[in-house]
Image (cartoon, grey):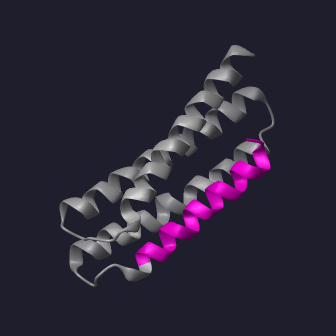
Amino acid sequence: MDKFELQDRTKMFGLNILRLCTRLPKTPEAQVIRRQLVHSGTAVGANYRAACRAKSRRDFIAKQSIVEEEADETRYWLELLVEVDIDDSVIPRLMDEADELTAIVVASKKTARSRL
């Protein structure tokens, strides 16, 4: 997968998070989770784009670490939705995508570190 495909994939992830958030109930707990999901879910793509424009390999690794953290945080908030019994068929797919994006970024960081 090249950087442009991953840019598209991370953007689609953010869009799918936003779409999920529009369907969440208006309960206090869902509103807290919605706010956090919007932030972390859209930050994955934004920070990946920043990583693609890194000034050095070390800068790339640092920015990819942020992408990894945001993807993992998004997974956490999705898990909380499940725990508070918010049922949406897209949540498991988004959890899988968060896991896959995290794995891709971890592998990318490992490769970049081996080339330092």
Q: Is residue 44 above or below residue 2?
A: below
* Magenta-drawn stretch contains 4: yes
- Tell me the quadrant of the picture where the C terminus can be found: top right
Q: Is residue 49 visible?
A: no
- In the rendered view, does 97 fall on the left or right side of 7? left
The residue stretch that appears in magenta = 1-21
Q: Residue at x 60, y 28 (%)?
A: 107
- In the rendered view, does 93 fall on the left or right side of 67? left
Q: Residue at x 27, y 64 (%)?
A: 81
* Magenta-drawn stretch contains 98: no
- Tell me the quadrant of the picture where the N terminus can be found: top right
Residue 111 sits in quarter? top right
Kindly report the secondary structure that dominates the magenta region of the rendered protein. helix
Residue 2 sits in quarter? top right
- Residue in the foreground of this view, choosing between 12 and 27: 12
- Residue in the foreground of this view, choosing between 92 and 42: 92
Can you give x and y, in whole percent of width and height, for residue 82 in the image? 25, 61
Can you give x and y, in whole percent of width and height, for residue 95 in the image? 41, 53
Q: Is residue 104 above or below residue 90?
A: above
Q: Residue furthest bottom?
A: 26
